[in-house]
Image: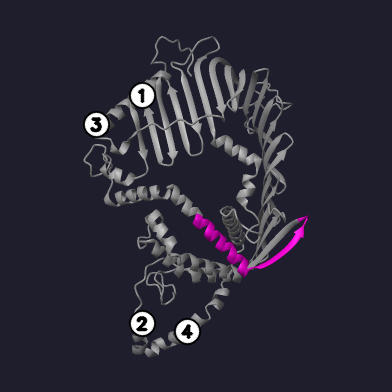
Amino acid sequence: MFCPKCGSQLEDDAKFCAACGEKLEAPQPAAEEAAPVEEAPVEETPVQEKAPVQEEAPKPKKERKPLPKWALPAVIAATAVVIVLVIFLIIASNPKTTVKSALGGLDDAMADNEIISSMFTALNEFNLMVDVQQIYGPDGQGALPNPMKYDIYSDGTQSSMYLDFLGAKFDVHSTTDPLALIVNAPDIGSYGLAFEGMKEAFRKSVFHPDSGSKYALDMNEEALEMFEEFLDGYEKLLKQESMEEMNDYLSEYGELFIDLMWEYGEEESESVDGNKVVTLTMDEKAMAKVVKDFIAELTSDEELVAFLEERIPVSMIAGEQTWIESWDDVMEMLKDSASEMTDAIKSADFKIQLSVTASPIAHDLKAIDIKISSEGVSVKAGIAFDGNNITISAGMAGSKFVLALEETEDGWTVYAKAAGEKLFEAEYKESDEGWSFGVEAMGETLLEAEFEESDGKYEFLFSVYDASMGYDDYYDYDDGGSDQGPVFGLFCEGDYTEEKGGFTITIEELGITTDGWTESVTMDATIGYYTDFDMPEIPAYTDLLAADEETIDDLVALLEQFFNDAFGGMMGEAVPDYDYGYAY
C-alpha cells in the first residue's frame, strides 16, 4: 500500500503514514486487485516485483547511500548527546538500580555531593531581608523619598515576598500545593489566581469573550478552545499526584529500556583499581531490537494511554497535526512508524559501548562512559564521581571537552577545557576572615568578589571587568600588578552579626566605580540572610477570576495610583520637602 499524500510505501494495515503522518482510510483489497485484472499487460511487471521488494526490504535499505562526510560527525555527536542524556535521566529516575542497571544511581551520586547540595539548599531555602532607610550623597545631599524594605522567604514549595516600596506596602505569595499566586495589599485586599478549576472559573469571569464585559478577551472560537484546553491541561499536569504518576512511569519504562539493552547487548565485567566495571556493547541490530520491543510495550500500555488522556490534552502536543484526536492516535502513529525506525537503525552501521564503574560492595556509582563508533568516527562522553569532584567529558576526532567541579583545600573550582586549553574558571575560597570568588575566561579576569570580617566589622569588594577594554587612560588601578581596572566596582562596609543560621550586615558607606568615575555615599541600610526561619502563612484571598467588573475597575485605579506615586517618588515629586541634589 502507498500513501495517497506523499507516495511512501507502507504496510497494508497501516493507519497512518510513517513518513508524513497522513491518516489513512481502511484499505480496499477488492479494488486493488481489480486493476491488474483489467490491465494485466501493463501491471504484470510491478505486481511481480512488489512481493520480492517486501520480502527483501532490509537489503536495499542497507545499501542506502551513507551520510555526506561533512554531516557524519554532527549526526554522531548529536546521537551521542541524546543517548547520554536519556541514559542519565533513566538512571536518575530509578534510585533502586542494581549492578545491571547502572550500579547505584546518578541521583544518589549527585545528592551526596556536598558542594552541589549546599548550593541547592542556599538558593532554595532561605529568608533574605533588605531594609534601606536613607541614602545620602557625598555632600549630605539627596535622600530616598521613602524607605524601601524587602523580605523574601522560600522553602522549595512556597515563596513569599513582602515589599515596602516607596510608601506602598504589599506582599506576593506563590505555592505549588495547591498551585496558586496571591497578591495582598492593605488598600487593595487579597486577590489571586488558583490554578485548580481555572478553566471553569475563566468561563464565568469578566475576562471570557462571551461575558460582554469591557475586560472580555478578544478571541475567536479556535483560540478560545486552545486556551481552555491549555488551562485544563496545565492544571491536571501540575497536580501533585500527576507528577508522582509521571515519575512512576518514567522509572518503569526507564528500567524496561535498560533491561532490553542488557537482554540484547553483550555484557562484560572486570575489576579495575578495586572497582567493578560493567561494559555493555550493542550494534545496530541489537539496538533495533531494543527499540522495536520498547515501542511495542509502550504502545500497548492501556493504563499509560488512559493516564495521558486524563492528564494531558493531546492538542498540547499535536500542533498543526489536526488528524491527531486522541492519545490512541499518537500510539497508533508510533506503532506504524516502528518498522521504519528499526530499519533506519539497522542500516546505520554503528556500535555503542556503555560502561558503568562502581564500588563492588556499596555499589556507589563512580563513572558512566559511553562510546559510539560509526564508519571510523568515534564519539566519547562520560561523567565521573570522586568524592565531591564531578567531571563531565565529551570528545571526538582527537578533540576533548571537559567540564569539572573540583573540591579544593579551602573551597571549590568549576572550569571548562577544550583541546587542553582552559576556557573558563570560577573559583571560591574560604578563610578565617571571610571568602573570595573570582571568574576568568581565556586567562582574563571577568569578575572578583571579596568579603572580610573581623571584630564585628566587615568589608565587601565587588568588581566586574571587561577584558576587551583598556583603562590606562582613566586611572591607575592596583589589582596585583595588572593595569586593567574594573568597568564596574562596588565597595561597602559596616557591622556584621551572625544570627538565625545566617548573618546580618549594615551598610554605612557605599562606594561605586564605573568607567573611571568614582563616588561614595553614606547609607542607613541593613541586609540579612537567614536559614533558620518560619514560613509566613498564606493569606485568605479572592480568586481574581471571580471578581466582577466594578471590582476590577477599583483594582485598576489603585494600581495606577500606586505606580504614579511610586515613580513620582523616585523622581522626587512625592516628597517636595527633600533636597534632591542627586538622582538615585
Q: CA distance from mark 1 to mark 3?
A: 18 Å
Which quadrant would residue 115 be assigned to in this image? top right
Inspect the image, locate mark 1, and give the three-letter code of the amino acid beneath it: Pro
Q: CA distance from mark 2 to mark 1?
A: 75 Å
Between label 1 and label 3, give the one nearer the viewer. 1
Local secondary structure at mark 4: helix
Q: Secondary structure at mark 2?
A: helix
| Dot 2 and dot 1 residues touching (CB under 8 Å) | no
Mark drawn on residue 29:
2
**Stretch of the chain drawn in magenta:** 248-274
Circle 1: is it few (<14), some (14-19), or many (20+) Cα within 10 Å? few
Q: Residue at x 41, y 63 (%)?
A: 330
Disc 4 versus disc 2: nearer the observer: 2
Q: Amino acid at mark 2?
A: Pro
- Mark 3 lies on a secondary structure that is helix
Dot in front, 2 or 3: 3
Question: Does 150 sit left or right of 82 as displayed?
Answer: left
